[in-house]
Image (cartoon, rainbow, N blue to C red):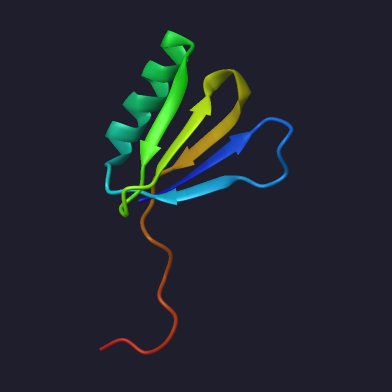
Amino acid sequence: MEVKIGIQNVVREVIIETTETAAAVEKLVNDAIADGGILSLTDGKGRRVVVPVATLAYVDFGGGVAGHVGFRS
């Protein structure tokens, strides 16, 4: 699932592909906001993204992987 994280005063959003479900990502975001700490997500390759919740502008998640380019059988 693709997760887009908007950060205050940063022009580009952070985009990661994670194997987590939408419900799991929502829980991580809600818990991080409630604790006032950090949002930590790991992508499918093991790369970890850590963002202080004080700087979060938005978190966009859901849907699936973007469509494929080219021929499919």
Answer with the quarter of the image where residue 54 lies: top right
Residue 64's place in the image compared with 9, above or below, is below
Q: Residue at x 43, y 42 (%)?
A: 61
Answer with the quarter of the image where residue 34 lies: top left
Find residue 48 and report its horizontal and vertical position in percent.
39, 40
> For the C terminus, which image quadrant?
bottom left
Total marks in image: 0
Residue sitting nearer the eye, 33 or 62: 33
Residue 3's place in the image compared with 72, above or below, is above
Q: Residue at x 34, y 34 (%)?
A: 25
Find residue 47 and report its horizontal and vertical position in percent.
38, 47
Q: Position of 51 compared to 62: left or right?
A: right
Q: Residue at x 46, y 21 (%)?
A: 38
Residue sitting nearer the eye, 30 or 32: 32
Find residue 8 and report its horizontal and vertical position in percent.
68, 30
Residue 23's place in the image compared with 2, above or below, is above
